[in-house]
Image (cartoon, helix red, strand yellow):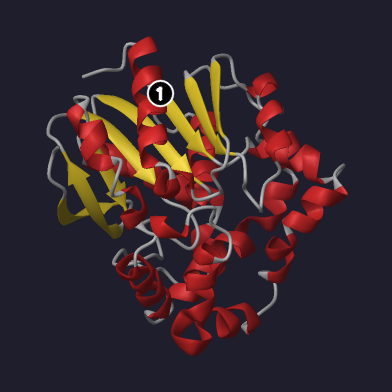
Amino acid sequence: MSDIRTRQIQANGLTFTIDEAGEGDDIALFLHGFPESRRSWRRQLPFVADQGWRAVAPDTRGYGQTSRPKGRGAYRFDNLTADVGALFDALGARRRILIGHDWGGIIAWAAAIQRVRPLDGLVIMNAPHPAAYARHVHRSPAQMLRSWYVLYFQLPWLPELATTAGHARAIERAFVGTTANPDAFSAEDLQAYRDNALQPGAMTAMINYYRANALALNEAGRTLARRIETPTLLIWGEKDPFLGVELTELNAPYVDDLTVRRLPGVSHWVQQEAPDQVNAAMKDWMATNWLMG
């Protein structure tokens, strides 16, 4: 398996810390979710590199060792998707696969919808198409309850206080309290996520993804409804406590070429809980779509 290297690159006026494996200008860019970091892709980068791609996972803006601009406006969709384009450019991409989980998946959907750069493939993990989610949540009391934290994060200062108390004990609970496989997270993994959240300004930056985009997500059924022509793979852990599995059935109207792989017994943290299944699903899909390096 290819080794993982860590370095920093400049893109969109920010300094991004990235992990990467492999070589070349065929770039597979991995975007993590909340409250994770580039570490969440540790089991995918070497695997995808061995398929012939340079696999790259940044700490997204505000997270980990990447620049942390101040103000919630810095975390609006237009800035997040501009980061995607700038990262591909900084990496010298010739071909591009965009891969995202959770918030990274939402950003990846938006980047594909907005066509910030031509994509050869799109892989989404446990994140519904924004338009599908917006329309569903307004009709589903069950999904509204699952999404309670989105409203909670609109409060000032209290979420930061609660999530960082006890050396960010709530960050650890976010994983171990919802995972279907506690062994997927080592003590070292959990400590790394807690340490990231405790960096000055980090928790506010992380929560600002929700604060800056609450209205945009609510209106996504109108503003982000453009069809995606890029071949798309949706991988979904069926035991996700935050997003109902019915959301997997609502994305087809927005994607011309959609493949769905549901993983029973796997929770929201799909690529960390079931790396072998996730990697196998990606490899099969890449082979079918002529995306092997």
Nearer to the camera, 8 or 3: 3
Q: Residue at x 66, y 53 (%)?
A: 242
State whether residue 118 appears in this view: no
Q: Which quadrant would the N terminus be assigned to in this image?
A: top left
State the residue in front, 241 or 27.
241
Query: Which is more toward the observer, 270 or 135?
Result: 270
Q: Residue at x 22, y 29 (%)?
A: 53
Question: Quarter holding the C terminus?
Answer: top left
Q: Position of residue 245 (x, y in %)?
A: 68, 38
- Residue 84 quadrant: top left
Confirm whether residue 29 shows in the render: yes
Q: Position of residue 214 (x, y in %)?
A: 68, 57
* Residue beneath disc 1: 121
75 vs 151, left or right, is left
237, above or below 177, in the image: above
In the image, residue 32 sits, relative to residue 62, either above or below, namely above
- Which amino acid is tagged 1? Gly
